[in-house]
Image: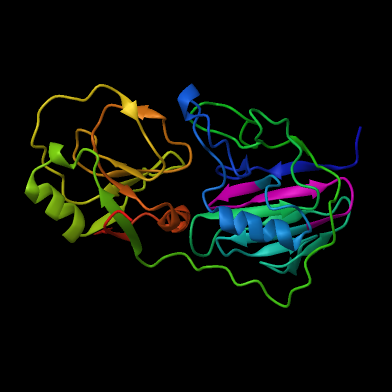
């Protein structure tokens, strides 16, 4: 039995293993997956001496609790939250040493939704198609964490980063998403396009890693019926029959038959990982470069 491992004492509401995902397999029906806030995951990996693509844990709302079998360095970031080691307060957003057998408690988020936990050596789950990411839609990758699960760790790759502080973006008070209209904007009335880009929406509690669902004005269709299934991309704004836009995130399906009225620029998507239900959403039209 290797001593490079973590015991999951408390799995939390939804904690998954994530890395940079599986881009390039959409033609096989395999979603991209990966961390919803990749820059946060990469920063935390750097803080503990991992390469940027090492697998981390992504928590949802209420954190998790872990007990290492050997001494490890960890860094917790993403959604701000309390961190304790052996019941004593520890730093958030900085490298922390957790001795063998001590309990690392990642508490509930005080703002935002998703936290990230990087561990020296990275989570060494078995790769699938070159990635250790958990994909909730296809079921590829390791299962979401459960109490009592043991997670193998890789060998430490390097020393922790020497930093005084590592600023991380705060969860958004308002989610501003720049969109390029199309490819199926012509399936909607002019009023619907105007509503999308001028009216206020809110993040729905039904959002998940597959898509950020919204509440707000229903978008009126100009054409009846449905499309044959066609390819879907990260950031696609799909409109299901209820007329409320859904922004596709990391675990999105690779095909779909509901029309896509717009596509969000990829650089605007990471804040969606931290947008709590009720957060205002604005879709801002921009021109294709």
- Residue 165, by quadrant, is bottom right
In the rendering, at what x and y percent does residue 76 appear? 67, 60
In the rendering, at what x and y percent does residue 206 appear? 36, 43
- Magenta region includes residue 156: no
Residue reaching furthest front? 289
- Depth check, front residue: 54 or 27: 27
In the rendering, at what x and y percent does residue 233 appear? 39, 38
- Horizontal relation, residue 60 to residue 239: left or right: right
Residue found 76% across the figure and 38% down from its top: 124
Badge count: 0
Q: Which residues are magenta?
A: 57-73
Residue 186's place in the image compared with 175, above or below, is: above
- Horizontal relation, residue 161 to residue 183: left or right: right
Which quarter of the rendered picture does the N terminus lie within?
top right
Q: Does any portion of residue 279 appear in the rendered image?
A: no
Residue 201's place in the image compared with 131, above or below, is: below
Which quarter of the rendered picture does the C terminus lie within?
bottom left
Residue reaching furthest bottom? 164
């Amino acid at each position: 039995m290797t001593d490079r491992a973590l015991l999951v004492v408390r799995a939390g509401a939804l904690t998954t293993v994530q890395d940079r995902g599986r881009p390039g397999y959409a033609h096989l029906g395999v979603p991209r997956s990966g961390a919803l806030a990749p820059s946060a995951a990469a920063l935390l990996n750097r803080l503990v001496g991992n390469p940027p693509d090492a697998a981390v844990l992504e928590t949802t709302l209420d954190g998790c609790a872990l007990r290492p079998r050997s001494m490890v360095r960890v860094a917790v970031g993403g959604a701000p939250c309390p961190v304790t080691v052996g019941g004593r307060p520890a730093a958030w957003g900085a490298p922390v040493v957790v001795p063998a057998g001590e309990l690392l408690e990642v508490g509930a988020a005080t703002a935002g939704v998703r936290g990230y936990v990087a561990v020296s050596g990275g989570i060494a789950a078995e790769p699938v198609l070159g990635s250790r990411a958990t994909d909730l839609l296809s079921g590829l990758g390791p299962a979401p964490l459960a109490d009592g699960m043991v997670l193998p760790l890789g060998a430490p790759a390097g020393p922790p980063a020497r930093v005084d502080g590592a600023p991380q973006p705060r969860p958004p008070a308002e989610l501003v998403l720049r969109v390029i209209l199309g490819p199926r904007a012509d399936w909607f009335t002019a009023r619907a396009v105007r509503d999308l880009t001028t009216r206020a929406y809110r993040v729905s509690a039904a959002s998940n890693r597959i898509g950020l669902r919204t509440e707000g004005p229903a978008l009126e269709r100009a054409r009846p019926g449905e499309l044959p299934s066609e390819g879907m991309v990260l950031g696609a704004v799909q409109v299901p029959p209820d007329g409320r836009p859904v922004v596709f995130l990391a675990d999105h399906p690779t095909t779909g038959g509901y029309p896509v009225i717009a596509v969000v620029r990829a650089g605007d998507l990471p804040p969606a990982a931290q947008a709590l239900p009720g957060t205002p959403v604005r879709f801002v039209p921009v021109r294709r470069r």
